[in-house]
Image: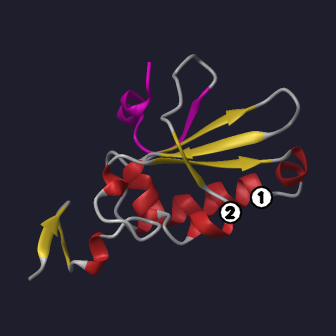
Amino acid sequence: MPTAYSGMLMTADATRGPYGEHDRESSSWFVIALSQEQVHAGHLARIIETFTELFLAAGSPRGAAMFGSSHDDGRSDLYLNPRAAVLAKDLMPANGARRCAPPLDEGGVELLVGHEGDRRLLSS
């Protein structure tokens, strides 16, 4: 029997998380860590653009956000909150996403895709 979730009708298989787990997507953040070489090769822009397309195609859902943090040495980290991870389930494995704690909002994390109110999703 289908289960209602976030306004969408889903089957039991559709409720699996990005890596096949049930119910873990509700609490798992993911990070895509990019090297300086990957950033210079355009991977950062490509991933942001692809996620933006997924976000818009899903109707710009509130609470699904991508955050970014740049390092002095040219590396960048992209963070996907749990709802964003569901949207990006096919994007994440190809880009080496791994589970992480929510990033701390200490001024170095920028909201890249999402609604301004989604900043509240960061840890403080």
Q: Between disc 1 and disc 2, whose residue precedes?
A: 1
Q: How many labels sit on residues?
A: 2
Q: Element under label 2? A: loop
Q: Residue at x 52, y 22 (%)?
A: 105
Q: What's under tag 1, amino acid-wise?
A: His
Any part of residue 96 in sight: yes
Give me the disc on residue 124. Answer: none
Q: Nearer the viewer, residue 68 or 1?
A: 1
Residue 64 in picture, x, y percent from top left = 39, 50
Give me the disc on residue 95. Answer: 2
Give the position of the N terminus as an image quadrant: bottom left
Residue extent of the magenta highlight = 109-124
Residue 48 in picture, x, y percent from top left = 63, 54
Q: What's under tag 2, amino acid-wise?
A: Asn
Which of the 4 image quadrants contains residue 16? bottom left
Instruction: Give the side of residue 13 with respect to residue 28, left or right.
Output: left
Q: Is residue 112 magenta?
A: yes
Q: Residue at x 88, y 31 (%)?
A: 73
Give the position of the C terminus as an image quadrant: top left
Q: Nearer the viewer, residue 88 or 42?
A: 88
Instruction: Give the side of residue 33 with respect to residue 97, left or right.
Output: right
Q: Are marks 1 and 2 in contact (CB under 8 Å)?
A: yes
Q: Give above or below for 71 relative to 46.
A: above
Give me the disc on residue 43. Answer: 1
Q: Label 1 to label 2, Cα distance in Å?
A: 9 Å
Which of the 4 image quadrants contains residue 72? top right
Residue 42 in picture, x, y percent from top left = 82, 57
